[in-house]
Structures are given as structure tokens and as C-alpha cells.
Amino acid sequence: MTPPLVTPHAPPVRDPAPAAASPPPPKIDVQQMSFYYGATRALQDITLQIHPNVVTAFIGPSGCGKSTFLRTLNRMNDIIPATRVEGKALIDGEDIYAPGVDVVQLRRRVGMVFQKSNPFPKSIFENVAYGLRINGMAKSRTDLAGRVEESLKQAALWTEVKDRLQTSALALSGGQQQRLCIARALAIKPDVLLMDEPASALDPIATQRIEELVYSLKSSFTVVIVTHNMQQAARVSDRTAFFWLGRLVEYDRTDRIFTAPAEKLTEDYVTGRFG
Amino acid sequence: MDRPIRHFQEELETMQARLLEMGGIAEERVRVAVQGLITRDVVLIDRIIGGDEPLNHLHVEIDDRCFRLLALHQPMAVDLRAIVAAVKINSDLERVGDLAVNIAEAARRYVDHPPVKQLIDIPRMGSVAQTMLRDSLDAYVKHDIDLARSVLNSDDELDALKTQVFRELLTYMLQDPATIQPSLDLILVSRHLERIGDHATNVAEDVIFMVSAQDVRHHPPTRVG
């Protein structure tokens, strides 16, 4: 039997944010989380803290559990039958798996953007306005229009669409559609934005725009991004977690993960020796 | 603003600003070291001998910035050349800082003796070396290949002055053995200044490479003018 890669519950975590006198409390605090698809244990005793207003990237080879882990953070896995979670996930100190938690409310606070853009077959305006309407978040038509504009600006899409807000979202390019989905997620003012391979279906220019956007969003949001593209994780994130076979191998500042990782396994992965 | 600024460019510019700051400090330390020698001012000399820490700190910081830029952003083409050039320029500037200390150390020994002669060529060498250093860094900022090439040309002048200093001091030493020790220190100073010119030349060559992707090192001189 091979020895464990890391001490259970204690992945190598070196000092947190640099030069922070007293770091803010974690936005997300996951403690000894395991996740099961039926009898298969897809995540094993994951413990990590995600800091507010930084971009945290999850990397690892296919099937390592990074997307599964991302989806535990807004309980998107709940919709998959025969799954089970052990351990705790606290957001702002509250256990999101505690009995009585309103999952719809949780997903409002923890928004999500998927690999494939999925705009509604409606106008550009309506795509962003939809969440505001069903959540009763706009006081008036003017307020609604203002919030739609703000979200489109945050998603770096406004100048490209401001003259055709009433045209169908499906007429936009792939990269624009993805930014529209980001605008839609931002409109209801989440605290946390989860992004699951948000640029993997886009060309290099559209990818660069999404990356720039991700980087700029952290001033207002806590961003967690799953990517199979290591270079993307290096470019956009402040902290990186490396997953392998359902385990968290290493979690550290991104510059350390990509220049001097503590674990041999991480080094082998980031240098392309496997995965 | 609708379109975010590429943060890579920001970090690249910050790194380059720090490199220029380092160049400014290195140049100033050379100036003060030579000034201390000429005016026999022990306070100035000691300030140089004991003050290399800020440059050493910048040396490490800039290397670290370049290292992270390379690892995290995978720069290409002119960006890649700019960072590789910065790594090399950084080393050159750090060595210039060390040479300023070496000049100050020689000056510290020299002022314990009566002056061998009135210093004429060494101040000229100091002036040429500083100009080369300043021009090479200006060329870096402005991406100015012509200015960089002019730095390469100045190196010959510095070499000629160094040979002249050596020949002249040799005659003093032959005439009076009591002047051997201070003369050797002056020869060392001229040697250090000539080395500073070499480092400025390296910087200029890196600038040419950064701007034009043309490697002009170790080639027969195709000098402008």
C-alpha cells in the first residue's frame, strides 16, 4: 500500500496572504469534506479555506475531483441522485449543509458559471434582468435597467451590446455569450462566483478577455475557478489548489505552486510529467 | 471602465520601473565613489562602502518579479525578450553596485597616502562610465537602438583611458617605489571603471536584443559613426 500523499486534513499550506497583519476570516471554510457518488468516494477529507476577494484556482487531471468539489460549494451536487456529503462547508461561518438551509438562497449568494455558455433564448437585456425580476431585486424599470447596465459593465460586455440590448442573446459570439452568463450571475449580487472551466470552449482572444475579467472581478467578489489549463490558473489566480485522485495534494499561493511547489506530485503535474 | 487593463502589462511596467530605480542608484553610487576619491572625502567613501544593501535588495526583488512573470504569464515575443533582458540587466547593475564599493575601498586606501598625482584621466573615466550607464538605461526606457549603439562605441574610449592611466602610473612607480601602493589602487580604480563600462555595454546589447531581436554580442564590431 502506498503511503498517504499528505497528512490527512493538513495539506501543506505555507503562510497565507503575504504581508497581511491579520488576515480576514476565510470566506469559505471547508473541513474534512468527503463526497460520494453512490459507493465511490470522489473526494477524500478535503480541508481548505478560501479567502475573500482573491481568485482561487482548482487544478488537477481529469477525474481528480476539482469540479465535484467546486459544485459542493453551492450544493449543485444535490441534484445528482445517490450522492452524499460528509464534513462541513462553512460560508461566512455558516454551515451550508446544515438542516434547514435554503438552497435557493445559497445559490443566490454563491453564483456559478459553467463551461458551456447557456444563455436563455431571450434578449440580451432579459438574460441579465431575469434573476433580478424573479428575486424582486429591482424597485422600478429604471432601477432594473441600471442594474442590467452595471452587470454588463462588470462583465466587460457593455460597450459591445449597449446598442442592441433587445436582440437575441443567441446571436452573440461564444465569448460574448459566456460574458453574458457572467453578467447574469453577477446581477443578483452574489458574494462568491464559482466558475467551472469558463473559457475552455473559447478561442484565445475570447479566453484572454474572460481571464482579464476574472482578474478584475476579485475586487468585488470571491472567485473560485476550476480549470484544466494550468497556464490559465497561473495567469488569473492568487491561490491554487492541486487535486489528485479526490485528494487535496497542495494548496498555496499561485506563484509558489508554479515556481516552487512543496510536493513532488504537484511539481510533476505542473511540469507536465503526468496528467 | 468597460475593458480591464491587462494586469500582466502592469506587472511588467512595475518590474521595469524597479529596474530603472536600481540603475539610478547604481549610477549615483559610482558618481559618489569617484567623487570621494577625487576630493579625498572619507565620509563620502564610507557611505559607499557601507551602503550596498538597497541595491542588493532590489537585485533579489527584480529577479523574483521576473521569475514570477515568466512562470505565471508565459510571455511571448517582445514581452519574453523584455523579461529575459531585464534578468541580465539586473545582474549587470548589481555588479556595477559592487564595483562602486570596490572603487570606494581602493579610494579608502588611497587617501591614507599622499596623492601620487593630480587626477585627470580617472575623473574622465568616471564621467564616461556614468554616461554609458545612463544612456544604456535611457535606451532601455525609450527602446532606442541608436542610443544603445552609441554606448557600444563609448566603450573603446574607456578602454583607451584605462591603458593611458596604467602607462602613466607605471612611470611614477618606476621613479619612486613609495608610490607603488597608491598607484596600484588608482590602477584598480581605473580597472573597476572600465568594468562598469563593460556592464553598460552588456545592458546596451540587451536593449538591442529586446527591441530588435538582434543578438549583437561577440560579433565583429559594426559600430555606428
Image (cartoon, coloured by chain):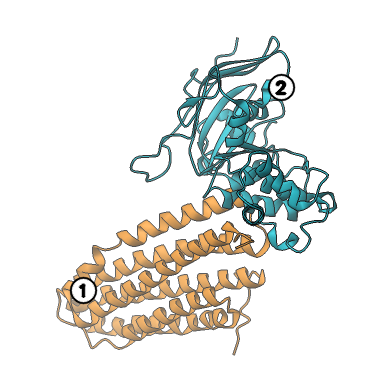
Chain colours: A cyan, B orange
Res B218 visible: no
Say above or below: B42 vs B174: above
Whether residue B64 is visible to the viewer of this picture, yes or no, is yes
Query: What is the crowding at mark 2: few (fewer than 14 residues within 10 Å), some, or many (at least 20)?
Result: few
Q: In which quarter of the image is residue A118?
A: top right
| B142 or A21: nearer the viewer | A21
Which residue is denoted by mark 1 in the rendering?
B44
| Relative image position of residue A255 (x, y in whole percent) | 52, 44
Residue at position x 65%, y 45% in the image:
A232
The relative height of residue A147 versus residue B55 in the rendered view (above or below) is above
Q: In which quarter of the image is residue B174?
A: bottom left
The mark total stands at: 2
Q: Which amino acid does label 1 sit on?
A: Leu
Please determine whether, in this image, residue A69 is positioned above or below residue A172.
Answer: above
Please state the horizontal and vertical placement of residue A178, each as a whole percent of the image.
74, 47
- Residue under the image location 55 percent in, 78 percent down: B148
- Name the mark nearer the viewer: 1 or 2: 2
B223 left or right of B95 in image: right
- Chain to which the residue tagged by mark 1 belongs: B
Measured as percent of width and height from the top left, residue B180 is found at: 23, 75
- In what quadrant of the picture does the C terminus of chain B appear? bottom right
Q: Which mark is residue A79?
A: 2
Specify the farthest residue to the front.
A140
Secondary structure at badge 2 equals helix
Q: Which chain does the residue under circle 2 lie in? A: A
Q: Considering only vertical position in the picture, is B76 above or below A16?
A: below
Image quarter of residue A274: top right
Check disc 1 and report its element: helix, strand or loop: helix
Q: How far apart are marks 1 and 2 (CA)?
A: 75 Å
Check disc 2 and give the amino acid type.
Ile
For the N terminus of chain B, the quadrant is bottom right
- In-image side of B168 versus B144 (left or right): left
